[in-house]
């Protein structure tokens, strides 16, 4: 009987042990710290929004993930990362849309997604345009400094052929960390706003130089009325499509106005139109007067005659 009880007790222990599950070890988690240049980029982990940089995300499952930084006006930066337990830092230097997209393909573990220079020095970069406004048919000079990279990449964005950004040149950096480049497109461009983007060869830092191009358009002028008398007022209206920000008005006529007198410099309306009213002094002699309108860079002009009668 005693032996039977012992056997039954052993069977009961085996059954109880079989029904008791051993808890699986908890999955390890990692902490990710995000930063970017410029700051404020949107963070997406496995296509899920996680806030903006700089930011810290805790409780991330270890293993492979897809990390993406997004910011308006910049190329999205996507990379594969492998999260480990502990804290990992991730940094992205976003590239302006005028440049080519940076698409790293290799996995990064617990490190930076920055494309650093091969020398290990964080690059610095400056750029300056020789002219804020250049005229079609002339050249534009760009200068700057660069450290941590032996080459500067220059991308140009603007209207026409430059809408999607064009690589203009790969410029060597001198031993004193300076660089220069002269752009001479001749007449193969159109007027408008342009931006030259300079990047180091690994595209970790960028600098921009906005400028405008004028010329290649026309100026018009209409006088209302075309006949008036001393003391009368004439309204001048027209359109300027050269890309200039404004126009000048010059009046020619008999007597003291034979060499002309500049009446005004006007800023164009947003639709490139202008309007100006001029009142003839009562002492002006009768005769034919000419109103000439030109853009600020004198690439185009137009004239209209006004008859002044006594």
Image: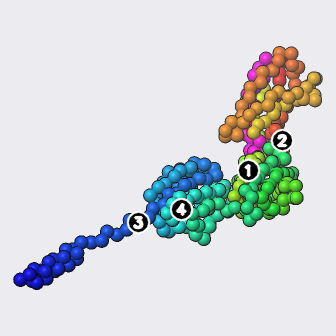
Location of residue 17 in the rendering, given as x and y in whole percent from the top left corner: 22, 75
Marked residue nearer the N-terminal end (2 or 4): 4
Find disc 2 in the rendering and name its residue: 297
Marked residue nearer the N-terminal end (3 or 2): 3
CA separation, marks 2 and 4? Answer: 49 Å
Q: Which residue is most to the top? A: 282
The nearer-to-camera label among 3 and 2 is 3
How many neighbours does mark 4 have within 10 angstroms: few (below 14), some (14-19), or many (20 or more)? some
Image point 65% across, 60% down: which residue? 114
Location of residue 148 in the rendering, given as x and y in whole percent from the top left corner: 77, 58
Residue 136 is left or right of residue 73, and the answer is right
Find disc 1 in the rendering and name its residue: 208
Image point 13% across, 80% down: which residue? 6
Location of residue 72 in the rendering, given as x and y in whole percent from the top left corner: 59, 51
Q: Which residues are magenta?
A: 228-244
Find disc 4 in the rendering and name its residue: 67
Query: Is label 4 in a helix, a strand or a loop?
Result: strand
How many neighbours does mark 3 have within 10 angstroms: few (below 14), some (14-19), or many (20 or more)? few
Marked residue nearer the N-terminal end (2 or 1): 1
Query: Is label 1 in a helix, a strand or a loop?
Result: strand
Determine which quarter of the picture holds residue 171. bottom right
Find disc 3 in the rendering and name its residue: 27
Q: Nearer the viewer, residue 212 or 254?
A: 212
């Amino acid at each position: 009987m005693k032996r039977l009880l012992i056997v039954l007790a052993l069977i009961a222990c085996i059954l109880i042990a079989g029904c008791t599950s051993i808890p699986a070890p908890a999955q390890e988690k990692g902490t990710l710290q995000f930063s970017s240049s410029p700051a404020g980029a949107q963070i997406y982990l496995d296509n899920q929004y996680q806030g903006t940089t700089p930011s810290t995300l805790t409780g991330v499952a270890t293993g492979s993930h897809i990390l993406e930084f997004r910011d308006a006006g910049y190329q999205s930066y996507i990379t594969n990362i492998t999260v480990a337990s502990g804290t990992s830092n991730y940094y992205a230097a976003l590239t302006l849309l005028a440049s080519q997209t940076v698409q790293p393909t290799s996995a990064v573990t617990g490190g930076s997604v920055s494309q650093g220079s091969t020398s290990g020095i964080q690059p610095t970069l400056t750029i300056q345009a020789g002219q804020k406004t250049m005229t079609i048919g002339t050249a534009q000079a760009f200068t700057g400094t660069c450290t941590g990279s032996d080459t500067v990449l220059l991308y140009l964005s603007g209207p026409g052929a430059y809408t999607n950004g064009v690589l203009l040149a790969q410029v060597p950096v001198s031993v004193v960390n300076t660089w220069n480049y002269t752009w001479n497109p001749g007449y193969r461009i159109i007027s408008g706003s342009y931006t030259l983007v300079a990047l180091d060869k690994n595209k970790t830092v960028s600098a921009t130089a906005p400028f405008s191009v004028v010329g290649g358009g026309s100026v018009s002028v209409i006088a209302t009325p075309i006949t008036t008398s001393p003391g009368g007022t004439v309204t001048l209206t027209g359109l300027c499509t050269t890309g200039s920000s404004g126009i000048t008005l010059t009046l020619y006529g008999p007597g003291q106005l034979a060499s002309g007198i500049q009446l005004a410099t006007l800023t164009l309306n947003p639709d490139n139109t202008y309007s100006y009213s001029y009142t003839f002094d009562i002492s002006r002699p009768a005769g034919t007067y000419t109103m000439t309108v030109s853009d600020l860079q004198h690439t185009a002009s137009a004239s209209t005659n006004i008859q002044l009668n006594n």
